[in-house]
Image: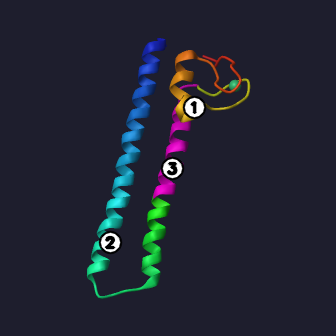
Amino acid sequence: MDKNANLKNFKMDLKKFDRNITLRLFILLGLCLIISYIYERSSFKSNTIDLALILYLVLSVIYSIIATIRGKKNICIKYNLKCPQCGKVPKAFFAVSAMRSGKCPGCGDRFGT
Ligand SMILES: [Zn+2]
């Protein structure tokens, strides 16, 4: 495949993924906001629900971080960015430059194409 086209597709996939995960986080946080709003206005108060809402918020953020790392790793694997030498997949931050140079940021070996 043409290298530039491949790089373009790769960047587009990463961008699409970013948009997707941001949207998901917004939905999760929006839901939390709606629930807290309803809860605040109701006369019903419970420490358990307070705690659950905080937990929900924390878990939403943790989920988004894990989903981002896993998702980007999967995109790298899809584009053959797994080093045959050391078996590492470049971190999201290095993925585009690794794709451009065709070299593993870990050991400097070339990716198999
Ligand atoms: Zn390597």
Q: Quadrant of residue 88?
A: top right
In this rendering, which labeled residue sits more in front, label 3 or label 1?
3
Q: What element carries label 1?
A: helix
Residue at the top extreme of this rendering: 2
Amino acid at circle 3: Ile
**Compared to 91, does 97 lie above or below?**
above
Which residue is the site of mark 1? 77
**Compared to 32, does 47 lie above or below?**
below
Instruction: Name the residue rendered at 50%, 48% in the picture.
Output: 67
Q: Quadrant of ligand 1?
A: top right
User: Does the stretch in magenta take in 69?
Assistant: yes
Q: Give x and y (percent) for residue 111.
A: 64, 19
In this rendering, which labeled residue sits more in front, label 1 or label 2?
2
Amino acid at circle 1: Ile
Alpha carbon separation for disc pair 3 and 1: 19 Å
Which residue is the site of mark 2? 35
Mark 3 surroundings: few (<14), some (14-19) or many (≥20) residues within 10 A: some
**Compared to 54, does 2 lie above or below?**
above
Amino acid at circle 2: Ile
Q: Main secondary structure of the magenta part?
A: helix
Q: Do the residues labelled 3 and 2 touch (CB within 8 Å)?
A: no
Instruction: Name the residue rendered at 51%, 56% in the picture.
Output: 62
State which region is magenta.
Answer: 61-80
Q: Give x and y (percent) for residue 20.
A: 38, 43
**Compared to 7, does 13 lie above or below?**
below
Mark 1 surroundings: few (<14), some (14-19) or many (≥20) residues within 10 A: some
Which residue is the site of mark 3? 65
- N-terminal label among 3 and 2: 2
- N-terminal label among 3 and 1: 3
Whether residue 78 sits left or right of residue 38 in the image: it is right
